[in-house]
Structures are given as C-alpha cells and as structure tokens.
Image: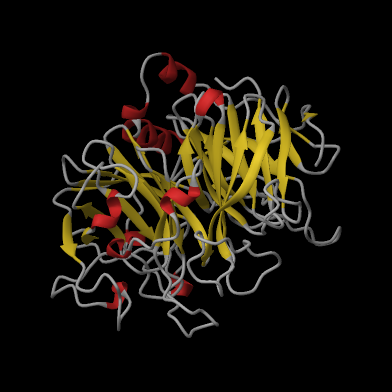
Amino acid sequence: MSPELSADLSPTRRQILSRTGASVAGIAFAGALSELFAGSAAAAGDTAGYGPLVPDPAGLLDLPRGFRYKVLSREGDRLRSGQGLVPSNHDGMGAFAGRRGRVHLVRNHENRTTGRIGVPTVEGLTYDPAAKGGCTALELDGRDTICDEYVAIAGTAVNCAGGPTPWGTWLTCEETEDKAGTNGYTKDHGFIFEVDGANPHRTGAVPLTAMGRFQHEAIAVDPRRGIVYETEDAFERPFGLFYRFLPHKPLGGTGSLRAGGALEAMRVPGVPDLSMIQETGASFDGVEWVPVPDPQAAETPIRLQDFGPKGITHAQKLEGCYWGGRSVYFVSSFARTKDGSAATHFGQVWKYEPDRRRLTLVVVFGPSTDIRLPGESPDNICLAPSGGLMVCEDGDGAQHVYGLTRRGEVYAVARNAQNIGTPEAPEWGEFAGVTFSPDRRTMYVNCYTPGTTFAVTGPWR
C-alpha cells in the first residue's frame, strides 16, 4: 500500500462543453441543471476547477495542488477478512454511512468466468460458483483507514455499475445476457442484486428478476416515488434502452424489491435513436413508458422484443445514471455511425423529468483536440460537493475524473498516472465508481486497471 501523497501544479486546460460554441453549451448546461444548485452551493458551482494537475512522483494519481490521496486497496492484496485476494477490474462503487462515523464502500468487480483475480466464493453470498464477478466491501474509519475488507456478493458476472438506494444498500448490475450453459455459467445472468455493505448476509445473493434480464449498467432511484431507473449498455445494434421499474413495494427498505413490480421501457415519440438529437436544450414532451413484453428475455433480448408499431427508443452506450433534484440524469458515453447509430457524438447527458414527462438533452461533449485532456466519453457520474457533477472519463488517451460546473465548464480533478502500456505507446486504465463520503469531505474513486481504490481529500468546496 502506497503512502499518502500530496500534489503540486502542472499545466492543463479547461474545456467548454460545446455543440457550436462555449456560450451555447454553458447556457444549456446551466438551465438544465439549475435545480441541483441552491444557496452557497450555487455560488461555489460557478467557479471552475481547483487548478492544474501535478504529476505524481509515485506515478499513481495526478491531483491539483492542496489535494492528497491515499491508496485504500489494490488488486492482489490480501482481503482483511482472510477470504482471499482483492479481485481485479474495480468498477462502480457507492459510499454509505456506518456507525460511529464509519463509512462502508461497496465496490463492483467486472469479472467474467475468466480474469486475473475473481471474487472469492463465500457460503451464503455466492449466486453462481462459475462466475467470477461480484462486490467487495471496505469499512473505513473517520481517517479513511481500513478497518475491514470482505466479500459482499460473489458468483455474479460482469458487475459494471449500479447505484445506491434511499435505504442505504447498493444495487449491483450484471452487464451480460449470458444464460446457464454459456461461457461455463451454471445459472442465467443479466440481473440486478441488492447488497448490504455493512451486513452482506442480510441481502445474500438473490437476483431481482422482475427488474429485467439484460446488459445492465447503472440505476437511480426516485426518492419520492421509489421508481428505479435503469440503463442498458448493449454492445450491438439495436442498442440499449432506458427503463423504469415500478416496484410493488416502493421505498420499502432492504429486500422490498424482491416483491416484484412492472418493468417499462422509454419511448420518445418520433425519436427511434437518441443519437439523432444534437441540439443542447432540445426537449421532448409526452415521453411514453411501454410495458416490456418479457422482462426475463427467455427467448429474445428485451431490446429486440416487439414493442408495437410505434417501436421503442434506443441509444448506444447508455451508462451512468443519477438522481438530482426532481429529475433523473443518464449518460450516453458516445455514438458512432460506423457501429450502427443514427449519428455520431462524443458523449451526452440527458435529463428526464417525471412530473412533466419531459426529456431534455442537457450536455454534449467534445471532441478533445488533445487526448491527454478531458472532454469525451463520460461514464460513471455523481454529484460533486459544490453541487455540480463529477464524471469518470472512459475514452482514448489519458483518463480523468473531471467536474462540470453549471455553466458547462469542464475541469480536471484527477488523472490516472498508472501506465499499463509502454513508454513508447502509453495506455491508462479508465476511472470508475466516483462517489463521495457521507460528510462530502472525501472523494472515493477506482482505477479499473490495475484495480486500485483511492481516497482523495483536499479543499473541496
């Protein structure tokens, strides 16, 4: 484990999100996200960034001056529980308040049947012994010192992202549609599982089958209604859908989602593919929600099922999902006509307002003119302490965590300095799982490869 390090300054650049110009993007971003800002948070959100990034002498994480990081956990380390090794492929993550000021981190591991280090199987916490994905949990004290680290769920597959529930559990999502007998699996996959990071045996390893079987990415829960929104990151055309799950027992607490509910997919009238829309601020009223014919996808993947003569709305690379104010935000990381999308873009953030049944394109990204700088392929997303957004980049070249102000300015918060390529052809693993401690003083984030979990502290506004 590396020691805690500090950072100094080095040049970088702010980018302005833009379709045709900085002012257009800034106004669109500010207007669409205005409900996320209030009082002092709004004033803080108007100030872009914490200064340029400083190259880390240890070659792990570049940060602005005044910020420090601590390496909490790395793949291949021993789990404090003695259950085995820290698994590979660190992905989505959530932070939850524990007793006596402690924090419970629940961390996804996007492993398949093969991989460097799978999640150890544990009795009572394993769904399919042939699958190597799952979650581990870290228990931290008030100084971000690890008190314990253990398996939270095992035997799941390709645990990509997910999201927190209002009652303090984590919903981990399988990004696969493989059935039993495929790739060595002994059970069907493509489900969501609920994980209690403080007491994993309370939730066990039970698939929430009513929430659908597809290539899940992330979720966000409406804290007023209990509706769960879900993104699908399908790899082939037709691409994924945006879903909502109407639980029979909304906001019922741990285990309530097992009671089932209804799964529906979003239809935007006249828009079969969200990539068609390029205008920031473009809005669509009268969004429809169509019942999914077969949520279990017994014979046909959901996105290929018959949704009637009006069809359904697809989008490439639907990834991050987050609830803010009275709306749900979701990310399309990119779209490419060469892959089969209707149009090309370098990342979008969409907002859906349930009260108005309105969908709005609030941000259009990039492209970047310098691959060492942020500005394309947004992935995981969360709220920043200032009220803006924090976004993990998953594109080409250098990988960043970057912030977005309400004026649409992009500023770098962290840069992955772990070169997994060669000096002549450097490569950097993506960031994932950005989240903040309950007191908003620490940012936790994962480097996917090599699997590394960081705690970042500093003068957060």
Is residue 449 visible in the rendered image? The answer is yes
Which quarter of the picture shows residue 254?
A: top left
Left of 238 or right of it: where is 305? left
Q: Nearer the viewer, residue 221 or 369?
A: 221
Compared to residue 286, the image places residue 23 above or below, namely: above
- Residue 179 location (% of width, % of height): 43, 80
Q: Residue furthest front?
A: 123
Tell me the quarter of the image containing the N terminus. Answer: top right
Left of 346 or right of it: where is 84? right
Which quarter of the picture shows residue 419?
A: bottom right
Q: Which residue appears at 59% of the width and 56% of the height?
A: 395
Q: Which residue appears at 39% of the width and 65% of the height?
A: 191
Compared to residue 240, the image places residue 223 above or below, namely: above
Left of 190 or right of it: where is 301? left
Q: Nearer the viewer, residue 75 or 216?
A: 75
- Residue 61 location (% of width, % of height): 74, 40
Q: Which residue appears at 31% of the width and 28% of the height?
A: 35
Q: Which residue appears at 62% of the width and 49% of the height?
A: 150
Left of 24 or right of it: where is 1? right
- Residue 323 location (% of width, % of height): 35, 40
Q: How is the image coloured?
A: secondary structure
- Residue 184 location (% of width, % of height): 55, 82
Compared to residue 432, the image places residue 210 above or below, namely: below
